[in-house]
Image (cartoon, helix red, strand yellow):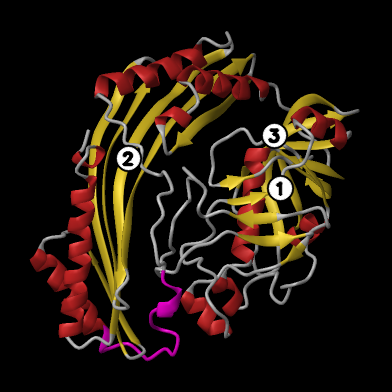
């Protein structure tokens, strides 16, 4: 596929590290008091099939370099996709020129040298897939065929997509830290259309992993896409009501993302978070533990250091329901008068401790209410926590699914939703950088007819 998928990754890594060292020297030569840069090189294969025919095949290769230079507390940044020596020197020159025209910011600068990663552990992130186009096409077709053949009500397909990417990324700064590592990601997805009478629905499924060995079989992905689609047929609308709401596990990831956004340093120092001032206070019931595992082997968001070069480490975000930490990079930490938490670039492999109930048990526990399987829109106001999203799913009575529902809106406030978390399931059966089971929320407003 690409020379990144062969044994010369070490040579590629050494070349990118040298590029970093050269540009840091150039920045110093031009008078910068400090500098940092990241350089990456990725290559891969992407293709799609539809109705058994190949639609697209694309070999990809991308380079990228970004540099920031500091003249005291004045910062200038530049980027380029050309990694030739002349282009790199020109990017340094542009960044230095920009710095002369920027206003000083006391927090502009590198993270403390003593916080830099002292080692780059092998997190088992690199599993290149040297796959021929013909074999990749065959996998995608098998996936789509399984979906199309799973039920007679599957009448059309939006196709199946396959991708495999291998890359190298190196970060360095004028503290003398230079570190990099290779990584891969492989994905397969399928989306189909079902029809029953006048009702038509569409849904999908996917699998994603660092290693091909960890992906779901192509046929399983297709069948699950079909099952999800058929289950949505003949959906009804609901009347407006206030009821318990169960978020299916893959949908509940959005609630954890909202938590991560609310405790992100940028929203905190700008005072645009509904959790401002809540550190060391209970924001969930006492059974809740939420934690970050940046060194998880083969994790989709694993990294030995963050975007500032700061060593990453495992930590509890919420313990016994109490918020224990913010998620800070060096800049936001400085603005808040705190120390970085090693989260430049966000949370890495955020997880909530799973409960003991599987999905059927969670539905029985819901008893009567809404089981949400799809959300639409961006209706989350981070500054207030107000939450309003278009939704679809299933109406539940007596602990059993009764019928699918659509064209409804669910509304509440994230602070109330977090406090009103009744249970978390153990039904985490999908690949994501966020690990969670389904969430049962005590009560929300469902707006329908």
Residue that appears at 71% across and 48% down: 353
Q: Earlier in the sequence, mark 2 or mark 1?
A: 2
C-alpha separation, residue under disc 2 versus residue under disc 3 = 28 Å
Query: Mark 2 highlights which residue?
Result: 165
Residue that appears at 33% across and 91% down: 72
**Circle 1: element type:** loop
Dominant SS in magenta = loop
**How many residues crowd around disc 1 within 10 Å: few (fewer than 14), some, or many (20 or more)?**
some
Query: Mark 3 highlights which residue?
Result: 427
Task: Look at discs 1 and 3 and give the one toward the viewer.
Answer: 1
**How many residues crowd around disc 3 within 10 Å: few (fewer than 14), some, or many (20 or more)?**
many
Which residues are drawn in magenta?
A: 99-116
Q: Position of residue 22 (x, y in %)?
A: 16, 70
Residue that appears at 49% across and 14% down: 146
Viewer-side residue, 159 vs 7: 7
Query: Mark 1 highlights which residue?
Result: 353
C-alpha separation, residue under disc 1 versus residue under disc 3 = 12 Å
Q: Is residue 69 visible?
A: no
Q: Position of residue 388 (x, y in %)?
A: 70, 53
**How many residues crowd around disc 2 within 10 Å: few (fewer than 14), some, or many (20 or more)?**
many
Q: Earlier in the sequence, mark 2 or mark 3?
A: 2
Residue that appears at 36% across and 89% down: 73
Q: Position of residue 321 (x, y in %)?
A: 78, 60
Does residue 5 lie above or below 62 as drawn? above
C-alpha separation, residue under disc 2 versus residue under disc 1 = 31 Å
In the picture, the quarter occupied by the N terminus is top left
């Amino acid at each position: 596929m690409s020379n990144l998928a062969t044994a010369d990754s070490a040579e590629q890594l050494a070349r990118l590290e040298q590029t970093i060292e050269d540009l840091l020297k150039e920045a110093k030569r031009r008078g910068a008091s400090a500098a940092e840069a990241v350089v990456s090189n990725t290559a891969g294969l992407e293709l799609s099939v539809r109705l058994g025919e190949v639609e697209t095949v694309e070999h990809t290769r991308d380079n990228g370099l970004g540099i920031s230079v500091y003249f005291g507390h004045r910062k200038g940044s530049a980027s380029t996709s050309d990694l030739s020596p002349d282009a790199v020197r020109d990017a340094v020159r542009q960044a230095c020129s920009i710095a002369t025209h920027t206003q000083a910011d006391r927090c502009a600068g590198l993270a403390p040298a003593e916080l830099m990663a002292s080692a780059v552990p092998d997190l088992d992130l690199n599993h290149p897939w040297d796959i021929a186009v013909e074999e990749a096409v065959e996998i995608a077709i098998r996936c789509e065929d399984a979906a199309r053949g799973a039920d007679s009500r599957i009448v059309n397909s939006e196709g199946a997509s396959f991708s495999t990417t291998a890359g190298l990324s190196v970060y360095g700064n004028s503290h003398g830290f230079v570190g990099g590592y290779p990584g891969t990601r492989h994905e397969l997805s399928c989306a189909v259309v079902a029809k029953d009478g006048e009702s038509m629905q569409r849904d999908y499924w996917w699998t994603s992993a660092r290693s091909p060995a960890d992906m779901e079989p192509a046929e399983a992905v297709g069948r699950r896409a079909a099952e999800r689609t058929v289950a949505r047929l003949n959906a009804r609308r609901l009347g407006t009501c206030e009821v318990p709401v169960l978020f299916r596990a893959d949908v509940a990831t959005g609630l954890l993302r909202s938590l991560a956004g609310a405790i992100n340093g940028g929203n905190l120092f700008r005072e645009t978070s509904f959790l401002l001032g809540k550190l060391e206070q209970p924001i969930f019931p006492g059974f809740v533990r939420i934690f970050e595992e940046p060194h998880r082997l083969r994790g989709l968001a694993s990294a030995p250091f963050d975007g500032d070069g700061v060593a990453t480490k495992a930590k509890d975000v919420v313990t016994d329901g109490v918020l224990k930490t913010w998620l800070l990079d060096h800049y936001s930490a400085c603005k808040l008068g705190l120390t970085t938490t090693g989260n430049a670039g966000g949370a890495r492999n955020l997880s909530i401790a799973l409960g003991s109930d599987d999905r059927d048990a969670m539905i029985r526990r819901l008893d009567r209410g809404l089981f949400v399987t799809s959300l639409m829109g961006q209706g989350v106001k981070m500054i207030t926590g107000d939450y309003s999203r278009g939704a679809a799913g299933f109406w539940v009575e007596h602990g059993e699914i009764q019928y699918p529902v659509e064209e409804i809106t669910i509304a509440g406030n994230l602070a109330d939703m977090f406090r009103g978390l009744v249970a978390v399931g153990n039904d985490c059966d999908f690949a994501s950088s966020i690990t969670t089971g389904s969430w049962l929320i005590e009560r929300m407003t469902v707006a329908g007819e």
